[in-house]
Amino acid sequence: MGFFGKMAASAGLGRGVRLGLIGAVLFIAACSTIYRNHGYVPSEDELALIEVGVDTRESVNEKIGRPSASGLLNDTGWFYVQSRWAYRGALEPREIDRQVVSITFSEGGIVQNVERFGLERGKVVPLSRRVTESNVQGLSVIQQLLGSFGRVAPGLLTGD
């Protein structure tokens, strides 16, 4: 094999290594984790604007906006829910964080309670709480949010 034959053989080997490296980089990039956020929860600074015992539904709506979920049974509270999901390649998506902010109103529409809940190891954990009275009326936040799953009336689905 002459000089030019050796050059051609080493060029083919270098090209194979480069293609292998490019393939490995693409494979690793395809398996990287993608994070997606769903829902909305007001920040602590936004919640600090709400005064327990002073603000009303209308003033809360002006300060932080109306949530997508409210009290399911008796409309005594507003619930802001946010989840963070991790997507990794072909694996099933995994929920890595969930936060729920509950704002409870009195019969007259005055803010009674502002609570923030988190999800830690599958259990609901209160992260912060501002309450005017020691007992919270009605169902707990989690009972209201999770109590409606599986209880969908057929008429709601068909529009009757």
Image: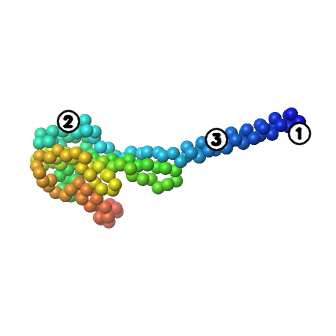
Image height of 121 relative to 63, above or below: below
Q: Foreground residue, 125 or 43? A: 125
Residue at point 62% right, 44% down? 24
- Which mark's residue is nearer the viewer, 2 or 3? 3
Task: Calculate the distance from the C-alpha at mark 2 to the C-alpha at mark 3.
Answer: 52 Å
Provide the secondary structure element on which disc 2 rests: loop
* Mark before the other along the chain sequence, 2 or 1: 1
In the rendered image, residue 110, in percent from the top left (x then y), is placed at 13, 44
| SS state under label 3 | helix
Residue position marked by numbered label 2 in the rendering: 49
Q: Residues within 10 Å of mark 2 (few under 14, many from 20)?
A: few
Q: Position of residue 15 (x, y in %)?
A: 73, 39
Read off the residue under disc 3.
22
Q: Which residue is mark 1?
A: 1
Q: Are marks 3 and 1 in contact (CB under 8 Å)?
A: no
At a point 64% along the width and 41% down the height, the residue shown is 22
Looking at the rendered image, the disc whose residue lies closer to the viewer, 2 or 1, is 1
Q: Nearer the viewer, mark 3 or mark 1?
A: 1
Q: Residue furthest right?
A: 2
Task: Kindly identify the amino acid type of the residue bearing the numbered disc 2.
Answer: Leu
At label 1, counting other C-alpha atoms closer than 10 Å, the crowd grade (few under 14, some 14-19, many 20 or more) is few
Horizontal and vertical percent for residue 154? 32, 66
Q: Is residue 72 visible?
A: no
Quarter of the image containing the N terminus? top right
